[in-house]
Image (cartoon, rainbow, N blue to C red):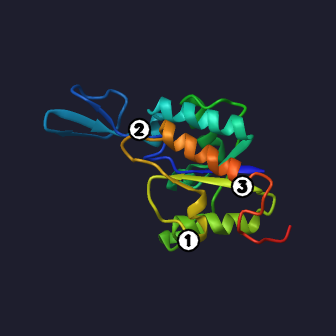
Amino acid sequence: MNIVFLDIDGVVNTPLLDTEPFDLLNGKTKKDGFYYGLAFPTDKKLYNRQAIMLLNKLCMENNAKIVISSTWKVLGIEYLQNLLVNSGLMDTIEVIDTTPYSEGFKLTRGDEIQAYLDNHLEVDNYVILDDEDRMLPSQQDHFVKINYYVGISIPDYEKAKAIFNRYKDKDYGLKREK
């Protein structure tokens, strides 16, 4: 099974910028004559459609399922699946799980992903899409660092696709017993 470990903020939810206030945003900041804002869970939609389209393409071409590694995981799988579909994710792409929740953020994102991999031996290959580099050294070859202000870009998609292709039908370094 191919997995995309997906962070939300900075990956598929990036800041909006406008000269007018955003009606849909609960929180917005005005600076230098511009309004900045991010979608909130209550908006029930994320605002970087291009990033969602590239996520669609990556998942469809690699038969990948999504595991949420974002702090948004506290909202639950069903809510997140609906949120992503409302934002343009194809409804045939499954959000199957979340990484374990780290009480008080005691574990890094990389630790949470490793805990998930250790408990899901059916994972054959994976890509991590995140805007923060909190991954373990053993995960660096599977990690695509996303620009927080841009979200998933075409070069990011190409790098993720290359990761899936590089480790296709190979032991990808976890040395696990199935």
- Look at label 3 and name its amino acid: Tyr
Tag 2: Cα neighbours inside 10 Å, few (<14), some, or many (≥20)? many
Q: Residue at x 53, y 72 (%)?
A: 107
**Numbered badge on residue 137:** 1
- Return the residue nearer the eye: 25 or 19: 19
Q: Which residue in the structure is indicated by mark 3?
A: 167
- Quadrant in the picture for residue 83: top right
* Front label number (1 vs 2): 1
Q: Are dots 2 and 3 in contact, CB under 8 Å?
A: no
Secondary element type, mark 2: loop
Mark closest to the chain's N terminus, 3 or 1: 1
Q: Are marks 1 and 2 in contact (CB under 8 Å)?
A: no
Instruction: State whether residue 47 is above or below residue 72.
Output: above
The part of the image, by quadrant, that contains residue 35 is top left
Answer above or below: position of 49 versus 175.
above
Judged from this view, the residue extending furthest toward the left is: 32
Regarding residue 104, the answer to whether it shows in the image is yes
Answer whether residue 45 is visible to the viewer in this image: no
